[in-house]
Structure formats: C-alpha cells, structure tokens
C-alpha cells in the first residue's frame, strides 16, 4: 500500500499505513500559515480490501465545524468525483471503502489542477470573442491569467468575475468553466445579447501558487488574499495588487467574487451592505439580482447565508467591500458548499463540478436581466 500526494494540489501527511483497516493521516498546514483543511491524495495497492482512512488532525482544521455532515470526494479517473459516507467524531475524520481498482484518489472537493487551468485558458483563447493576457507573475513565478470576453469595452458595461482567492475552494474554478462555456456559446441568444451590452474581465484563478501547493486559503507567502484588497503589495499579495490595478484601468460596473463555504450546505451571496458609500439603488439591484437568480436556479436560495453588515461596519480589506466602495458598483461574493445543497441533495455526487457549471449559467442569466440598469 502507498499513499502519495506529490502532485499538483496534493496535500496529506502519512502517520501510519501499517494496517489497511487503520490508515492514519494528517493534513498539512498552508505554507507560513496555520490554515489547513484541503486534502488531496492517492491511495495505491488497495484493490478488493476494505480500507479505513482516518485524518487525525481534522479537529484542528480552519473550519472544523464544517466536517459535520460532510462526505469525502473520491475518484478513479480524476474526472468523476463521487461521495463516500464519512464520520466526524472526537476530532477525527473517518471513512471506509473497498476499492474496485488498484488506486483511488480522495479530496476535500473535486480538484481543479493548474494543468486543467492551463487548458481552460488555452481553449477559451481560441474563441474570437476572447483576448487573453497575463497581468504579471505570482511569488512562485506563475502567470496571473486574465480573459477578456466580448466585442470590445467601448460603450459596454465593465463586468468583473474572479474566483478562487482561496485555492482550496475549487468549486469556484468549476463555476468559471461553466461561465466561459455559457458566454462563448455562439448559439446562446442570452449570451449574445449580454455581450452586446457588457465586456467581461475574468480571472478564473486568483491564487495559482496556493492551488498548486495544495493550500486551503493562502498564497505562497501565507497571505489570505481576501484580506489584502485595501493594502495589497507586490511583495506579499501580487495577485490582488495586479488585479486591483487592472480594475482601476477598466472601471467596474458589476463584480462577482466566487468562493466556497465549508459549513453551510447552501448556495448564497454576501453583499456590501456595510460600505460607507452604499446607495439605495445599489441595494435594490443587489436584491433584484438575488430574486432573479432564485427564479432561474433551484440551486440558489436566500434564507441561509451570512448576516448583512450593519451600516458603516464593512471591512475594506475584503474584496467585495473594497470593490463596491472603490467603484460604486454592485459587488457580491458567491458562496457554494463543500458538502451538498441541502435544498436539492444528491447522495451520489453531492455538490459537484457539474452543478457549479449550471449555477454559473444561472448567475449570468440573472445578470443579463439587469445589465441595462447597472450604473
């Protein structure tokens, strides 16, 4: 038997594999940080024997309460990720499984590798609607990719979509796949009409270094990018600095920052209600967007989510608050579950890459119905 994680986004530490019925593991912390919860590893030499996996340090994870009701993701082919019944008890995360093949991959959520990211950029760039560019480099020397989608920005609304500030929230880049598929489908009348009115700036992966290193929440310097927006520097958080500077060049009329939530088994958005300059029109548009998305997607809801900030209490270190305040625009954080959507559960797949893609279609459909009223 062998446990390995020396690959793109891999993360696990072997404690003891002397017995198949008691495989003991730990999750590694993010570099220069105490955050951890993302795991991704391969178990080999396990055919036709019941294996019991135990993550010993689950109780010290960043969001340990998120393990309650969570089921681990597993895959033979790294494309289809099914769920395995999982127990969280006494600070340990445990699951058992009899593999039908020699090796099986396990992960916190379906991984989205940097290789797949490169494929996404290359495939999108082949469209005549897309202009791709590199804003600069990360601390590990990776490219910060930007995709512009549309017929040109002149006279069109400036729409920014960014995802995966927290690299372990891979559902964000699966969502980006769905968004790009929607926008680049020349037979899609909603997309065609939307692109007549809007020019898109899309950063599918805000944190390439953390993604490749197998981090949950931080970049190569241990920075939580979603707390860097008001003071980003090239030395600590070049990812945010580069995107922020491009936003200043283009302006922002609508902004969506795509994330995942460890605890809540729902899809929801968090807004910008607490920023100092918030207007009644902005709040009305925020409400309208959510109502429209509820009508378009059964996977979206408004009952469960984060409490709105009281007036004047926003944290401008956070992306959504910073962008809304700086550009006077509609800005939102979209949260998707690591678990399943409790309103529409799927026992086999849970919340999945496919459902992330479908939700992206709903999000853009909702935008299409209000794009004329932005600004």
Image (cartoon, rainbow, N blue to C red):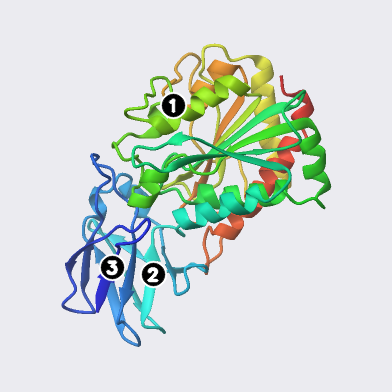
Q: Position of residue 352 (x, y in %)?
A: 54, 59
2 vs 3, front mark: 3
* Quadrant occupied by the C terminus: top right
Q: Position of residue 205 (x, y in %)?
A: 49, 43
The reply to whether residue 282 is in sight is yes
Instruction: Check whether the beta carbons of the residues at disc 1 and disc 3 lie within 8 A of each other.
Output: no
Does residue 162 appear left or right of residue 263 in this picture? right
Label 1: which secondary element: helix
Could you tell me which residue is drawn at 47 percent across and 68 percent down? 78
Q: In this rendering, is residue 148 above or below 230?
A: below
Q: In this rendering, is residue 43 above or below 143?
A: below
Does residue 283 appear left or right of residue 314 in this picture? right
Residues packed near mark 3 inside 10 Å, few (<14), some (14 to 19) or many (20 plus): some
Tally the marks: 3
- Quadrant housing residue 235: top left
- Quadrant housing residue 18: bottom left
Mark seen at residue 105: 2
1 vs 3, front mark: 1
Q: In this orientation, which residue lies closer to the viewer: 183 or 295?
A: 183
Mark seen at residue 187: none
Q: Position of residue 282 (x, y in %)?
A: 65, 20
Mark nearer the N terminus (2 vs 1): 2
Mark seen at residue 241: 1
Circle 3 sits on which residue? 4
* Quadrant occupied by the N terminus: bottom left
Could you tell me which residue is drawn at 31 percent across and 49 percent down? 64
Does residue 90 appear left or right of residue 370 in this picture? left
Could you tell me which residue is drawn at 55 percent across and 58 percent down? 353
Instruction: Report, in whole angstroms, how far the alpha carbon at label 2 lies from the one at label 1.
Output: 35 Å
Label 3: which secondary element: strand
């Amino acid at each position: 038997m062998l446990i390995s994680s020396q690959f793109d986004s891999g993360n696990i530490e072997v404690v003891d594999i002397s017995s198949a019925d008691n495989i003991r593991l730990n999750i590694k912390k993010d570099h220069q940080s105490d955050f951890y919860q993302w795991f991704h590893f391969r178990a080999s030499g396990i055919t036709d024997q019941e294996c019991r996996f135990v993550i010993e340090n689950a109780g010290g994870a960043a969001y340990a309460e998120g393990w309650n009701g969570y089921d681990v993701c597993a895959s033979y082919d790294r494309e289809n990720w099914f769920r395995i019944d999982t127990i969280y008890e006494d600070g340990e995360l445990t699951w058992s499984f009899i593999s039908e093949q020699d090796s099986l991959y396990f992960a916190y959520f379906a991984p989205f590798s940097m290789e797949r990211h490169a494929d996404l950029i290359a495939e999108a760039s082949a469209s005549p609607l897309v202009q791709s560019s590199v804003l600069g480099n990360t601390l590990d020397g990776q490219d910060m990719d930007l995709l512009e989608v549309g017929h040109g920005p002149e006279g069109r609304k400036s729409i920014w979509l960014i995802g995966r500030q927290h690299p372990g929230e891979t559902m964000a880049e699966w969502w980006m796949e769905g968004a790009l598929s929607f926008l680049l489908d020349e037979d899609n009348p909603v997309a065609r009409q939307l692109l007549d009115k809007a020019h898109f700036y899309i950063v599918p992966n805000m944190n390439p270094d953390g993604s490749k290193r197998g981090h949950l929440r931080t970049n190569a310097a241990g920075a939580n990018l979603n707390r860097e927006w008001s003071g980003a520097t090239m030395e600590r958080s070049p990812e945010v600095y580069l995107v922020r500077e491009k936003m200043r060049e283009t302006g922002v009329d609508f902004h969506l920052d795509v994330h995942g939530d460890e605890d809540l088994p729902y899809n929801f958005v968090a807004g910008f209600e607490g920023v100092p300059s918030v207007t009644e029109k902005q709040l009305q548009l925020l409400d309208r967007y959510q109502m429209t998305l509820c009508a378009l997607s059964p996977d979206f809801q408004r009952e469960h989510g984060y409490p709105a900030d009281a007036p004047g209490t926003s944290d401008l270190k956070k992306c959504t608050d910073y962008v809304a305040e700086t550009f006077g625009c509609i800005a939102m954080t979209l949260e998707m579950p690591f678990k399943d959507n409790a309103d529409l559960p799927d026992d086999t797949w849970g919340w999945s890459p496919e459902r992330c893609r479908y939700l992206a279609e709903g999000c853009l459909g909702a935008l299409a119905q209000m794009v004329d009223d932005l600004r």
